[in-house]
Image: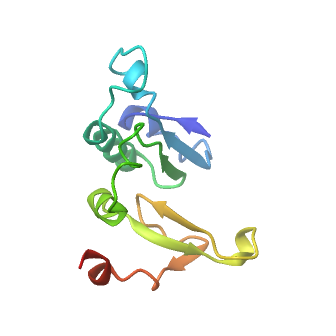
Amino acid sequence: MVIAYDYPAVVHLDTAAVDLCLVSDTAAMVVYGHNTALPLMLDEMLVHCRAVTHGTKTPLLVLDLPFGNFESDPNRLLFLLRLQCLVLELSPSVGGRQPVYFVSVKGRRENGRLSTKLRVGSLLN
């Protein structure tokens, strides 16, 4: 696993065979110079997430949400749509008895299939 915040940090991850890349809210401290991660806003994290997405194809990208930005939002679907993510359903052969749900920024289909259980229209009404 590698922590990254921008395009230059991830551009070589594919050739290095890195399997997981974390876009962390510690960007508040590393990039912006804050003493804690608390001042980082969701919009700032989305900028970093997009930059990392453009720099690599292979690793699974995980976005570490800023504290309090996701828990207080009652409509999680709008957040997922804003990230332009796809909800994927992993097959049980990946490591568990039940399918595992996760969000992939790139919407890759490796080791899974697009979930038909999510009906966007019904959740927005």
Residue 113 x, y percent position in the rendering? 53, 79
Residue 105's place in the image compared with 119, above or below, is above
Question: In which quadrant of the rendered image does the N terminus lie?
Answer: top right
- The number of numbered discs placed on residues in the rendered structure image is 0
Residue 95's place in the image compared with 1, above or below, is below
Residue 87 x, y percent position in the rendering? 45, 70
For the point 30% across and 44% down, the residue is 46
Of residues 125 and 31, which is closer to you in this image? 125
For the point 28% across and 63% down, the residue is 78
For the point 44% across and 32% down, the residue is 9
Residue 9's place in the image compared with 18, above or below, is above
Side (left or right) of 123 relative to 14: left
Residue 120 x, y percent position in the rendering? 31, 79
For the point 56% across and 70% down, the residue is 110
Side (left or right) of 50 relative to 58: left
Side (left or right) of 13 relative to 72: right
Residue 85 x, y percent position in the rendering? 37, 63
Of residues 99 and 72, which is closer to you in this image? 72
Side (left or right) of 122 relative to 94: left
**Display coloring:** rainbow
Task: Report which quarter residue 119 is drawn in.
Answer: bottom left
Question: In which quadrant of the rendered image does the C terminus lie?
Answer: bottom left
Residue 56's place in the image compared with 91, above or below, is above
Of residues 101 and 2, which is closer to you in this image? 101
